Image (tube, rainbow, N blue to C red):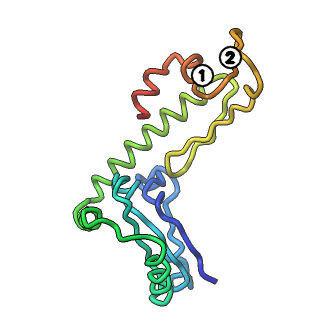
Amino acid sequence: MVRLTHSLTRLYTYSLTRLDVPHVSFASIDGMYDRTVVINGFSKSHSMTGYRVGYSASPIDIAKAIGKLQSQLTSCASSIGQEAARAALTTVDDKWMNERVRELQMKRDLAYRLLNDIPHVTCPKPNGAFYLLPDISYYYNKKTNDGTYYSLPYLLTHSLTHSLTFTRYIS
């Protein structure tokens, strides 16, 4: 059995700041190193969303098979993207990364708090990444006094006294 693991959000597991549970790679578990394929990228971890550069780490036989498949499905990453990825791997220090994680954690916490301040809206707090999935089902098929159906954008602009703060810090 081979374990395929996606690590694009690994750096945004807020445990890197030692505030929560530490991240554990499958490859570090006894007997799993030679059976783990890690797929990673730079979009989130190094703020390189437009570069479209990623990589995998796996046993050599699997890496060769991935290379054959990839060469038939996609084109090569740009030379600029490749150089930026090299620089990200070799020059970005842990201090910078931890600052970015803390920054995103503050944004997540603000968005989480503001969403949960809306009456009848609940939202679980994510342990990693920065995606919030609020439950607004209380408002399904309900209309406002002026006949408008409720939606999350409506709730954010009409129910929050902090909507400007919310928009400024989340974007």
Give the secondary structure at mark 1. Answer: helix
Furthest-bottom residue in this view: 61
Q: Nearer the viewer, mark 2 or mark 1?
A: 2
**Front in this rendered view, residue 164 or 148:** 148
Residue type highlighted by circle 1 = Tyr
Where residue 102 appears, as percent x and y from the top left, is: 38, 45
Q: Are marks 2 and 1 in contact (CB under 8 Å)?
A: yes
* Residue count near mark 2 (Cα–Cα under 10 Å), binned few <14, some 14–19, many ≥20: few
Percent across and percent down for residue 143 are 73, 17
Image vertical order of residue 158 relative to residue 95, above or below: above
Q: Residue at x 50, y 70 (%)?
A: 25
Q: Earlier in the sequence, mark 2 or mark 1?
A: 2
Tell me which residue sits at (41%, 54%) in the image.
44
Q: Residue furthest top?
A: 146
Residue 148 is tagged as 2
> Which quadrant holds the C terminus?
top left
Position of 131 with respect to 77 (left or right) is right
The mark found on residue 20 in the picture is none
Where residue 155 sits: x, y (%)?
Answer: 61, 22
Q: Distance between the Cα atoms at labels 2 and 1?
A: 9 Å
Decide: is 140 above or below 20.
above
Determine the secondary structure under disc 2: loop
Q: Nearer the viewer, residue 155 or 118?
A: 155
Residue drawn at x 74%, y 32% as measured from the top left: 137
Residue 158 shown left or right of residue 103 in the figure: right
Q: Quadrant of residue 107?
A: top left
Q: Amino acid at mark 2?
A: Thr
Where does the N terminus fall, quadrant-wise? Answer: bottom right
Which disc number belongs to residue 154?
1
